[in-house]
Image (cartoon, coloured by chain):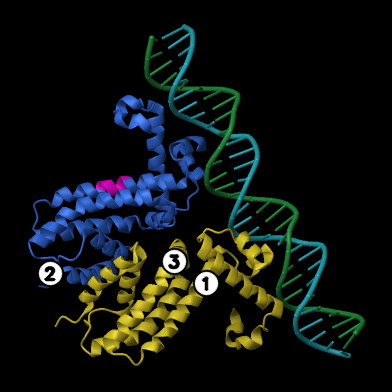
Chain colours: A yellow, B blue, C green, D cyan
Amino acid sequence: MSTADAIPTDLLKRPKRADALRNYEKVLAAAREAFAEGGEATALEEIARRAGVGIGTLYRNFPNRQALLEALYLGEVEQLCRSTEEFAGAEPWEALTGWIGRLVAYIGTKRALAAELMNYLDTDAALFATSRECLWSAGEPLLVRAQEAGVVRRDITIGELIQLVVGIVKIATAPEQVDRLLGVALDGLRYQG
Amino acid sequence: MSTADAIPTDLLKRPKRADALRNYEKVLAAAREAFAEGGEATALEEIARRAGVGIGTLYRNFPNRQALLEALYLGEVEQLCRSTEEFAGAEPWEALTGWIGRLVAYIGTKRALAAELMNYLDTDAALFATSRECLWSAGEPLLVRAQEAGVVRRDITIGELIQLVVGIVKIATAPEQVDRLLGVALDGLRYQG
DNA sequence: GAACTATACGGAGGCGCCCTCCGGTTTGTC
DNA sequence: GACAAACCGGAGGGCGCCTCCGTATAGTTC
């Protein structure tokens, strides 16, 4: 607080100790693994055990269950955002739908994690705001390009589009359903001049 | 099991005692109220307290947290299904979208409850199967009528349509967004011959 | 490399919630 | 009114979340 905000962070807090950083990574890896295997209800003490650290160490890095889930979630969202670069060379429609495909795949694998996080939706606006902004600014150029090329209706925003996709994927129970529902929704997306 | 299935249930198990039934209703009402107010993480002991019964009574009626959530959920889904009758007289497209409007409203109020139940999705196929079937058989006539009237594309099933709607509503953060996203999706739904 | 300090470690333990169990109470029946 | 079946309430065991603090280690300085 106060004046601290103006000081460059690398002068403010010196880097973490080497062992601390190692443990941080170990916990994150163990959590990713454990949540994938045993569902997101896995006890944090189990995760600490897997990571080979004490429960105290886990809590020092992630002050509560939610913080741990957030760290996993946000890390993977950022990776997804960076993937737009891969579609820079494609046609506007293919670039947009290609990236949406990535989004779909990501959500599919993280359905459990995301469901758990939804429980915190109200108390955790910051995380969702961050990841939303990350996704929006990543996806917007793709959408705008498709709209300027005249292949996508202009009265939809990237935010709405992403929510549409997320909603469809999250609720579907089978992969084929995702494809079909998405097909319907994307038909509605096409430019209808 | 065995031969019991063939015997009318009212001969099989005599009705609950009057006090037991009263308590059942009291718990259900208290749960509905408590979940609406304090989120679905409310302690079951708090609900028992609100209902004015012992925790043991709560657990006799609902062997675990999930069962209580299910009872709430299923009861309201059934009510939603019965509401199709109201649209019997409307035009095919209006009847379909009108009922979808009901569905939207229902999901909106129950978002927290549904999110909690999603956590049990894998272990609780039966409930979802039941409520899905209930919704499907309620909504299908509306969809078929619209399709036969030529106003809705024929390559979509009621199950897909409902999942589309549920997905959109569950993920949206503001009521206006629901309307817009739903508008896009319903455009994709219209007959495009 | 020894001494020193900030930083980090681990796990015992407090707390609250989930659920079970059973002695006591109430309801419905004869 | 008496009896059995059904039901009640809440004490208590178990477990997971999180805190706290005595101990250990990394990094620094000489």
Q: Chain of mark 2?
A: B
Q: Nearer the viewer, residue A151 or B40?
A: A151
Instruction: Name which residue type carries label 3.
Output: Ala
Q: Quadrant of the N terminus of chain A?
A: bottom right
Residue A18 in sight from this viewpoint: yes
Residue underneath mark 1: A72
Q: Is residue B133 magenta?
A: no
Q: Which mark is residue B191?
A: 2
In the image, which residues are magenta? Answer: B75-79
Q: Which mark is residue A114?
A: 3
Secondary-structure class at tag 2:
loop
Dominant SS type (magenta): helix
Q: Is residue A121 depicted above or below A10 in this figure?
A: above
Spatial CA span between label 3 and label 1: 10 Å
Spatial CA span between label 3 and label 2: 34 Å
Spatial CA span between label 2 and label 1: 42 Å
- Which circle's residue, 3 or 1, is located before the other in the chain? 1
Residue A92 rendering spot, x and y as whole percentages: 28, 88
